[in-house]
């Protein structure tokens, strides 16, 4: 720019000098002292003519021509012209050289039809040949007193050389122009353009079209192309149209660009409009309608500002794996390292970043997508090798939402959602987001392939996402989850809604609270700790630790397990609980060391000193299993020291004077099963061998005991009362003890309402009773009356025998 500006200015002075020289002999007002009055000194030399103009003792320019020829019609022709133009401080000199200049006095124009060479000094540089030049006045930082040759070498590095032809100048308008090629070179590089126009009055220079510049940026070359360029001499501003700069690792383009230069020629700022784009060799693209870049003294970018809708795109393809990322925001602020590498970006006023990855692990297509939304985003970048950069960290504020989904082949889509008031994330290889930390109203939402929707909220979250590549965990068969592991802390609330099945009642909503939740995709379990509490329809559970299966909804509770079931018809009670406890409509409770609730089957298993009770009815055993689907309860024991113990309430008591009081019936054995649909319970000896049954008036030992409850709503069971025993039947080698009496038989039936025991046997072995006072009796059946302590012997029409033994 400066070369052309100064060339045009020097050309104007040359024309003026030529005009004065040619008109010297023809002007009637010519005086011999006119040159001195004009400040021009004319000196005839052996090798030509030299014109010098000075002001205030300071040389402005010198014009030297080997020959001046006066042409017809007032034209003058100067041969082998060399013009030296000095700065106001005399610290620099510019030179214009041409074989021939022609001046038309009448038209006021000057033309150099042949080649013109212009040498311009960069501002602030003094050549060794300049008047009073000193080594301290050159670009080199050499100390004073250095050789003149060193100063000259440093000055040469600051020179700008221009070559063109067909240059013309109009002294009336002060405009110099050429339509020919303009070539220029300098220490930073070389360039060219087609056509140039210089307006000396306005101090502007325009390069018409086909502008090219090969400049050096450090050890690298930058190729710059533009359709049009305009320079302002005073403001040191250059405006480009349709400019493209190509460099190693990418290119930059702008529909219109304005550059502000320093005095040393380095760029201060770039203002781009009508579209500004940065593209890397790897395919990444950053674009905005308006952009501004600030540079340091070495032309390295320091800061950038983009607005009007910033778009970011990157894509990669490697074999069957591909990825694409697109982001947009209204504005963006860019920060660069001292070496000109992007290291930080600030996006605001609504940021959206979308990415998608596709691969074919084991020949089966896999698709993963992620979407980031937040009002503000900070992105940190790192070196990726070979001059490339990649994101290393991201931070969003003002409410951040990250969503995504995964799909294997044509299988179901598994979506997820992460959100928090503030989220920070880190990137792995291929610019893949691998870890996220969130604070403030944090939440995680996922939907399984089976359609179960799970939401976890808390104060803080940490999540590790599936990494890129075919060997990552996300590609394992049956594991398409993008969240590989996660931790949510502080006021954790978990909800899990199973999918609605056709023809089935709406499933119960599982809700859990805890101080901390940890999730791992291996097994897809969510671990709740710090006072976890679970509500699953009619079920409420607390424990030291609770594990929730993301896939099936199963619950595993560990340590101090406490569980309660509300009655059927309570909130979420799609599964009635009355049929899975001990027959009563009221709440039931279970305590145990461990528990497992299997959602699909509606089964609950309690282990380790398990105890279940409903009002006064209870059962304790090493293992208790509740089947909600079948409305059954079972309990087992393999240890004689820890049998299954069942406590049930009868319809009426037996002690004299205490009628209408509940009778307590205790049964213990090794294997217990209860069906609420049949209102029947069966206890077997199992590993313990026999079953022991106790009432207030008698005890029996047998192989099997069957307990029948009153129908729901009968007697004490109505109006919310507890379930009561109607009848107890003991079978197989029955041994009865009541007071001092002992009986034996094959079956014993106890009726709760009457308090009677009916002992029977077989035809070969009839029942028998021994009384220490009355002796031994036998019959077809023996009836013990608990209320009055009497015994009735029935023979059924057959012979009845009674043995009486007098006491000693």
Image: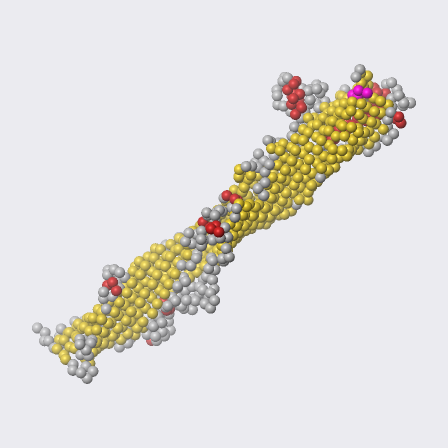
Residue 51 drawn at (x, y percent): 80, 20
Residue 357 drawn at (x, y percent): 53, 49
Q: Is residue 316 left or right of residue 742?
A: right
Query: Residue visible at 47% across and 58% down?
Result: 449
Look at the picture and state if 504 lies above or below 235.
Answer: below
Look at the picture and state if 636 lies above or below 324.
Answer: below
The quarter of the rendered structure image containing the N terminus is top right
Q: Is residue 163 left or right of residue 787?
A: right
Magenta residue span: 63-67
The quarter of the rendered structure image containing the C terminus is bottom left
- Using the rendered image of the protein, determine whether residue 285 is visible from the camera's viewpoint: yes
* Residue at the outermost right position: 28
Of 418 and 282, nearer the camera is 282
Res. 169 image quadrant: top right
**In the image, is residue 458 part of the stretch drawn in magenta?**
no
Q: Is residue 187 left or right of residue 726?
A: right
Query: Residue visible at 58% across and 48% down?
Result: 326
Residue 350 drawn at (x, y percent): 59, 49
Look at the picture and state if 58 lies above or below 693.
Answer: above
Query: Residue visible at 57% across and 50% down?
Result: 352
Residue 277 drawn at (x, y percent): 63, 43
Of 254 and 219, nearer the camera is 219
- Using the rendered image of the protein, determine whether residue 258 is visible from the camera's viewpoint: no
Of 808 and 558, nearer the camera is 558
Look at the picture and state if 383 lies above or below 83.
Answer: below
Of 240 and 692, nearer the camera is 240
Query: Residue visible at 34% across and 60% down?
Result: 606
């Amino acid at each position: 720019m400066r070369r052309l500006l100064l060339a045009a200015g020097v050309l104007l002075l040359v024309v003026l000098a030529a005009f004065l020289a040619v008109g010297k002999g023809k002007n009637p007002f010519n005086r011999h002292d006119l040159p001195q009055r004009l400040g021009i000194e004319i000196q005839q030399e052996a090798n030509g003519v030299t014109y010098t103009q000075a002001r205030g003792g300071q040389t402005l320019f010198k014009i030297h021509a080997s020959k001046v020829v006066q042409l017809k019609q007032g034209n003058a022709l100067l041969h082998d012209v060399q013009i030296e133009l000095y700065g106001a401080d005399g610290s620099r000199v510019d030179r214009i050289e041409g074989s021939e200049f022609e001046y038309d006095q009448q038209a006021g124009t000057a033309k150099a039809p042949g080649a013109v060479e212009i040498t311009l000094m960069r501002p602030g540089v003094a050549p060794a040949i300049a008047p009073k030049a000193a080594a301290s006045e050159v670009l080199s930082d050499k100390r004073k007193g250095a050789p003149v040759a060193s100063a000259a070498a440093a000055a040469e590095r600051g020179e700008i050389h221009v070559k063109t032809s067909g240059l013309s100048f109009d002294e009336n308008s002060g405009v110099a122009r050429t339509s020919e090629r303009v070539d220029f070179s300098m220490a930073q590089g070389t360039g060219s353009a087609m056509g140039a126009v210089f307006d000396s009055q306005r101090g502007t220079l325009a390069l018409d079209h086909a502008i090219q510049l090969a400049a050096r940026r450090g050890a690298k070359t930058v190729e710059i192309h533009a359709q049009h360029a305009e320079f302002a001499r005073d403001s040191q501003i250059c405006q480009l149209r349709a400019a493209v700069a190509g460099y190693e690792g990418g290119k930059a383009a702008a529909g219109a660009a304005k550059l502000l230069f320093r005095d040393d020629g380095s760029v201060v700022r770039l203002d781009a409009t009508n579209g500004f784009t940065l593209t890397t060799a790897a395919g990444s693209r950053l674009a905005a309608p308006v952009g501004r870049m600030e540079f340091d003294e070495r032309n390295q970018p320091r800061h950038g500002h983009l607005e009007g809708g910033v778009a970011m795109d990157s894509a990669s393809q490697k074999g069957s794996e591909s990825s694409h990322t697109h982001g947009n925001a209204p504005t963006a602020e860019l920060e660069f390292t001292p070496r000109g590498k992007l290291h930080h970006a600030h996006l605001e006023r609504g940021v959206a970043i979308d990415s998608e990855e596709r691969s074919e692990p084991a020949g089966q297509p896999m698709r993963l997508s992620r979407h980031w939304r937040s009002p503000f985003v900070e992105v940190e970048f790192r070196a990726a090798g070979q001059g490339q950069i990649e994101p290393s960290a991201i931070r969003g504020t003002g409410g951040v939402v990250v969503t995504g989904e995964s799909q294997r082949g044509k299988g179901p889509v598994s979506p997820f959602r992460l959100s928090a008031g503030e989220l920070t994330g880190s990137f792995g290889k291929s610019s893949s987001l691998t870890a996220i930390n969130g604070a403030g109203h944090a939440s995680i939402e996922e939907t399984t392939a089976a359609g179960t929707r799970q939401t976890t909220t808390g104060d803080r979250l940490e999540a590790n996402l599936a990494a890129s590549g075919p060997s990552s965990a996300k590609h394992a068969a049956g594991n398409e989850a993008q969240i590989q592991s996660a931790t949510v802390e502080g006021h954790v609330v978990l909800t899990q809604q199973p999918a609605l099945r056709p023809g089935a009642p709406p499933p119960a909503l599982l809700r859990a609270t805890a101080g901390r939740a940890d999730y791992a995709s291996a097994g897809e379990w969510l671990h709740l700790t710090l006072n976890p509490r679970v509500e699953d329809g009619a079920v409420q559970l607390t424990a030291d630790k609770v594990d929730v299966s993301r896939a099936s909804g199963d619950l595993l509770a560990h340590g101090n397990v406490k569980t309660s079931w509300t009655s059927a018809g309570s909130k979420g009670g799609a599964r009635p609980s009355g049929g899975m406890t001990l027959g009563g409509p009221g709440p039931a409770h279970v305590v145990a060391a461990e528990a497992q609730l299997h959602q699909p089957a509606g089964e609950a298993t309690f282990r380790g000193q398990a105890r279940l009770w409903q009002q006064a009815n209870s059962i304790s055993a090493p293992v208790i299993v509740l089947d909600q689907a079948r409305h059954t309860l079972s309990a087992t024991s393999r240890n004689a020291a820890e049998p299954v113990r069942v406590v049930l309430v009868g319809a009426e008591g037996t002690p004299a004077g205490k009628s209408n009081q509940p009778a307590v019936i205790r049964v213990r054995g090794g294997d217990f099963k209860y069906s609420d649909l049949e209102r029947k319970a069966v206890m077997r000896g199992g590993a313990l061998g026999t079953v022991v049954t106790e009432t207030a008036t008698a005890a029996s030992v047998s192989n099997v005991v069957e307990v029948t409850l009153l129908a729901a709503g009968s007697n004490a069971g109505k109006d919310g009362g507890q379930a009561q025993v109607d009848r107890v039947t003991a079978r197989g080698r029955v041994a009865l003890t009541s007071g001092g009496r002992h009986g034996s038989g094959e079956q014993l039936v106890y009726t709760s309402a009457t308090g009677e025991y009916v002992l029977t046997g077989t035809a070969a072995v009839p029942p028998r009773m021994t009384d220490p006072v009355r002796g031994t009796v036998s019959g077809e059946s023996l009836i013990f009356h608990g209320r009055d302590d009497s015994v009735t012997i029935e023979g059924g029409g057959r012979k009845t025998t009674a043995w009486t033994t007098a006491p000693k």
